[in-house]
Amino acid sequence: MVESAPVRNDFPDGRILYVLPKGERIYIVGSSGGECEIKSDEWGSLGGPDSGSRSVIDCRFLDIESRMHALLIGAAEYPNQPLEGPRFDVLAVKKSLISKGIHPKNITVINPGKATKESIMNELSELKTKTNPGDFVFIYYSGLGTSAFDYNIRPPLSENSAAIIPEDVASVKTRKELLEKLIDGLRDVQPIIRDLDVNGRFVWFVLDSEYGANFLGVGSTFKYENVVFISSAGAHEKSAEIPRRMLSTFPTIDNEPHGAFTNTFLEAINGLLDCDEDQNALISYAELNRCVRSRMNERGFSHTPVMYPELSEDNEELLSRPIFH
């Protein structure tokens, strides 16, 4: 399992809590000249003195800014089916990531109007060169998607995959061109994610598009050691958007249009939902998934988020880790 970056939490009284990769907690109680004075309840990862005592470590150990990276993709400018949500989705997700400790310089955004296949694939391919072993990589997509179970488009895709639809898909004229233009999870993206995985990155991939559950594999074909994947919808399901005309019925986190899943995801990661089932002041990936599913069902949305690995296949216990960790 990858030992990813510490997760930072700031308190009003000036204390800074870092949750270390194995769940240990340390508090920064003072810093000077690049050295941090810390007080720890547990010291396993640091090899420090007894529980509850103080010591000094190099502050660079806790440098989450250089160890956390994100790629955010919003696709909305489709000639026949324009979307309102993705532009606001990527803005709100970026704001949330910055609040979680990801430095703006480490966040790459592809905004609507720029979400071509070439631009998306280029940025995905560059993640390996932009990151190092042990880094946390967050990938987010909001836009249209498809799969073999999409009986409107009926794309020639494997049932063990799904695809995201780039904005330049309008240029295709044949089914062969359609297949080449789609960003097929099995053909185009899984090799990139697997390369990041085996080379020591921890990847959290969040996909807000219809039919997306199989994008990185399904069941036994989801073969990664350090990847958590959440799709807004099952393999046979469409995803709902909350357009501006529906805001009075379905209010959103910032009163702007959003994907129904993304809005719920934002509520959860920003502490607006009670997702902390075990009351340990942290939200695990499994808790987040259950919380988002419950909230979306409560609001009457017809699609159900899907998370991989499944609990029964989670040999690395990834889903028990705190989110952004």
Image (cartoon, grey):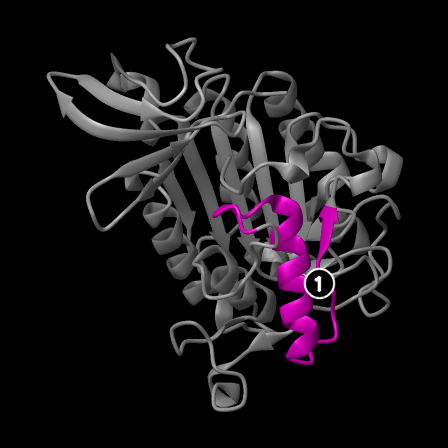
The residue at the far left in this view is 33
Based on the displayed image, in which of its 4 quarters is residue 37 positioned? top left
Looking at the rendered structure, the kind of residue marked 1 is Glu
The reply to whether residue 37 is in sight is yes
Name the foreground residue: 162 vs 131. Answer: 131
Looking at the image, which residue is at 55% across and 66% down? 264
Nearest to the observer: residue 95 or residue 299: 299
Q: Which residues are magenta?
A: 279-307
**Residue 198: percent from left, percent from top:** 65, 18
Q: Point out residue 92 in the picture as x, y percentages from the top left corner.
A: 40, 60
Count the marks: how many? 1
Judging depth in this view, the residue of 55 and 198 nearest the camera is 55
Q: Nearer the viewer, residue 15 or 154?
A: 15
Residue shown at 86% from the left, 44% from the top: 160
Considering only vertical position in the picture, is 14 above or below 82? above
Q: Position of residue 253 (x, y in %)?
A: 43, 72
**Is 280 covered by the magenta stretch?**
yes
- Quadrant the N terminus occupies: top right
Badge 1 is on which residue? 210
Whether residue 126 can be seen here: no
Residue at image x 74%, y 75%?
Answer: 302
Q: Quadrant of residue 52?
A: top left
Q: Residue drawn at (22%, 20%), measured in percent from left and top? A: 36
Q: Secondary structure at mark 1?
A: loop
Q: Is residue 116 left or right of residue 194?
A: left
> Residue 88 lies in what quarter of the image?
bottom left
Residue 85 within the segment the image draws in magenta? no
